[in-house]
């Protein structure tokens, strides 16, 4: 396997990409200031993030430009959140606790998903003469940016939305629900009024992790991810128990493993679509390797001729 060499954007392309990332970062606040309806605000963020992403990739014509914009957005988002924490501590003292709102969470999701799947869609359709070694290498470099960008946002969300959604109350009584599939049953039959939110959140929270791990190591099996997601889920529950920041629930672990399977299947689905388009020449598009069977075949022919 050949791993991508570092390819740099020109100074001008770099500045344009960073400017695009700053524009992405500003979109949620701009939407919130202009629109009161949340669904319309989400639509605003989606549409303009798509416009910015399309403008970047078709103006500069390099996947890395989109990756750099994503990285810029993530870096500023994380930095801004910690500035918000410091400011809150200085102004409110012990009464302050950092919170990621639902609007911020959904906006973060949109601002990563839109440019990522735009680049993936373009790459999926590249075939024949348009599918050059340079374009494959640049897409691999984009993936490197995209995964780093995702992990910065993902860790922030895991810590402040999943593990520490509110101030720890370690001296108070812990809440347990050890019924096997009891919580899931309550959600499905309508007993739990926030059931769908619970199922979606816990059922998808580890999908980004498994998706990223599959890109980092395409040979990873489903049972490997199952063990990783089970261990991660148990760790989450232990932390919540220790800090008393949530209900310790056995069903959470099963939902975490389900999320791991979702990430695994999404990655495999994209690779299968790419394989079908290229007649089996490119079976692992989402990886940091940028060689294909056809490339290897050409190399062997060249060696024989020599």
Image (cartoon, rainbow, N blue to C red):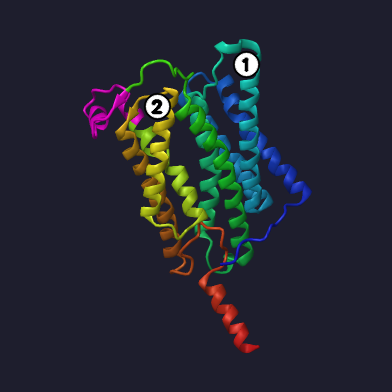
Residue 169 versus residue 158: which sits nearer the camera? 169
The image quadrant of residue 132 is bottom right
Classify 277 as above or below 116: below
Secondary structure beneath dot 1 equals: helix
Percent across and percent down for residue 53 are 60, 43
- Quadrant containing the C terminus is bottom right
Mark 2 lies on residue? 241
Q: Which residue corresponds to the image point at 48% horizontal and 69% vertical from the top-left? A: 281
Query: Could you say which is closer to the camera, residue 195 or residue 122?
Result: 195
Judging depth in this view, the residue of 286 and 255 nearest the camera is 255
Q: Is residue 177 magenta?
A: yes
Where is residue 185, by image quadrant? top left
Residue 134 percent across, percent down from the top left: 64, 63
Q: Which quarter of the rendering shows the N terminus?
A: bottom right
What residue is at 51 percent from the left and 47 percent from the top?
A: 117
Q: Residues within 10 Å of mark 1 (few under 14, many from 20)?
A: some
Numbered range of the magenta stretch? 176-198
Q: Secondary structure at mark 2?
A: helix
């Amino acid at each position: 396997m050949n791993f991508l060499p570092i390819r740099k954007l020109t100074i001008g392309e770099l500045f344009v990409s960073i400017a695009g990332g700053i524009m992405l970062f500003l979109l949620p606040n701009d939407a919130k200031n202009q629109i009161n309806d949340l669904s319309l605000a989400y639509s605003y963020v989606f549409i303009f993030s798509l416009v910015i992403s399309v403008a970047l990739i078709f103006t500069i014509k390099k996947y890395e430009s989109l990756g750099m914009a994503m990285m810029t957005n993530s870096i500023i988002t994380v930095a801004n959140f910690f500035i918000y924490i410091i400011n809150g501590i200085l102004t409110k003292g012990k009464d302050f606790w950092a919170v990621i709102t639902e609007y911020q969470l959904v906006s973060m999701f949109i601002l990563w998903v839109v440019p990522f799947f735009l680049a993936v869609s373009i790459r999926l359709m590249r075939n024949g003469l348009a599918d050059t070694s340079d374009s494959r290498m640049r897409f691999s470099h984009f993936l490197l940016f995209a995964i780093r960008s995702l992990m910065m946002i993902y860790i922030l969300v895991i810590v402040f939305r999943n593990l520490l959604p509110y101030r720890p109350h370690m001296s108070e009584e812990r809440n347990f629900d050890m019924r096997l599939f009891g919580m899931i049953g309550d959600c499905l039959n309508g007993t739990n009024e926030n059931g769908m939110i619970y199922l979606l959140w816990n059922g998808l929270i580890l999908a980004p992790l498994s998706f990223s791990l599959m890109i980092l190591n395409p040979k990873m099996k489903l049972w490997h991810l199952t063990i990783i997601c089970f261990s991660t889920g148990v760790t989450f529950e232990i932390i919540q128990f220790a800090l008393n920041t949530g209900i310790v629930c056995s069903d959470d672990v099963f939902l975490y493993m389900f999320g791991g399977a979702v990430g695994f299947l999404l990655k495999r689905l994209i690779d299968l679509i790419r394989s079908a388009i290229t007649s089996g020449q490119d079976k692992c598009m989402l990886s940091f390797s940028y060689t294909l069977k056809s490339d290897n075949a050409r190399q062997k022919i060249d060696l024989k001729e020599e």
